[in-house]
Image (cartoon, grey):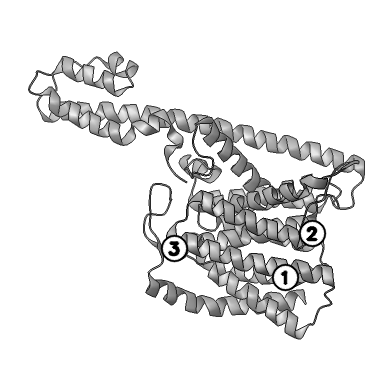
Amino acid sequence: MFWSTFFVSLFISYIGSLAVFPILKRLKIYDIPNDRTVHEKPMLEMGGLIFIIGYFSSLLFVLFTHNPEINTPLLNKLIGIMGGGIAIILLGALDDLLNLRPATKFLVECVIALFLCKCGIIIEQLSLIAYSWELGTLSIPFTIIWIVGIINAVNMMDGLDGLSGGICLIILSSIAVQQPSNTLVNLLIPGLLGGLIIFLFYNWYPAKIFMGDIGSLFLGYHIAIFSIIVVGFDSHPLGAMAPIFLLGLPIFDTLLAMLRRARNRKPIFKADKMHVHHQLLSLGLKHSTVVKTLCFVNLTFAIIVYFSTDKSTESSTVIIIGTTILIIFLISQLLSLQSILKTSLSRGYEKGVKNTVALYLQSNNYADININQNQFDKNQKSEALDEIALKIFNENQHEKVVELANQMIANQSEQIADPDSNKQ
């Protein structure tokens, strides 16, 4: 059933893509470049429709041809997943078309997560090594936080061509091999995998289409669900650490982003351009290299989780400690990289202002004026630049340079005060 469903999704997704491209072009649904994007020209958006079409087509194929045995609890979960899936598609489509406020998206996602809880998809118990805790009344709040968090974590990773789709392909494949006999796995995951492969054919760098929020929210939604009902917070030998490790990169990038924004007194849901993929790009790495590197990191975590199955308590303890040390090391490297980028951005801006003023002087035959270099190096605020201009120009000439310097400062001073002010 798994492979037949996969190939049906693969075929239908490809056929669907032939219709999606002209429809999106005719409707002029494009992602326009802005200060939080990496691409430089308008790109077709809502490409997630490609794997959504394959997903639902393959599900219908399974239900009508294989007639899988579905008991009442499983049926309730399936109804919940389908109902919530339709709602998340509508939410993503509206966000792509209307650019909804983060608070609105967050509220709707919470309602969808609550609906899933009522359908039996809920985290009731946490385990870690030899210890176990019943959540009791905290079950529903914890489940809602987890589902909403994973949905947005996947959404935040959708910043480079092929990145979010590649990571989701790795995570879903890992989930599929965890429990190959699970009915829900055989019903739903093959359809997602087949559609994702076709989509990545168009989305890999250089991309021809973006998945949009309709795609990233849909993928994050299903990954959150399967991390609960397949990987499990209490059934895996690694306990609660299994889904955390499996979804390691999106989770920790999101947590770092929230901490960074809180530290800078910015709204935690406001996008910026300091995610891990942006930082790696700033080091001069190629687009495709960054994507492959991050996919490899998440693949490493997925392999750790897979080979931890049926391990003893002692082995699980060693794996948890070792993987935690690896994660702490990666986080420390990210924080160091972030600090370096902030410093270089500030210094680069100061150098740019100095060069601009110097070029203006030369173009107006003031090359013989002796500018105190140390004074330039010490003064990093707009007021200090005004003072320097006053000292080296007469009353009639300094206004032009001050106007030029202030124009640059107005455009870039926010980056000096807070380099995180750029969007994702």
Q: Inspect the image, locate mark 2, and give the three-letter code of the amino acid beneath it.
A: Val
Q: CA distance from mark 2 to mark 3?
A: 34 Å
Q: Dot 3: what SS? A: helix
Q: Is residue 19 above or below residue 96?
A: below
Q: Earlier in the sequence, mark 3 or mark 1?
A: 1
Q: CA distance from mark 3 to mark 1?
A: 27 Å
Q: Inspect the image, locate mark 3, and give the three-letter code of the amino acid beneath it.
A: Leu
Residue at label 2?
Answer: 230
In percent of width and height, residue 406 lies at: 24, 29
Residue at label 1?
Answer: 79
Q: Earlier in the sequence, mark 2 or mark 3?
A: 3
Q: Earlier in the sequence, mark 2 or mark 1?
A: 1
In percent of width and height, residue 219 lies at: 62, 61
Q: CA distance from mark 2 to mark 1?
A: 17 Å
In percent of width and height, residue 191 lies at: 67, 72
Q: Residue furthest bottom?
A: 65
The reply to whether residue 145 is visible in this rendering is yes
Q: Is residue 251 above or below residue 175?
A: above
Q: Residues within 10 Å of mark 3 (few under 14, many from 20)?
A: some
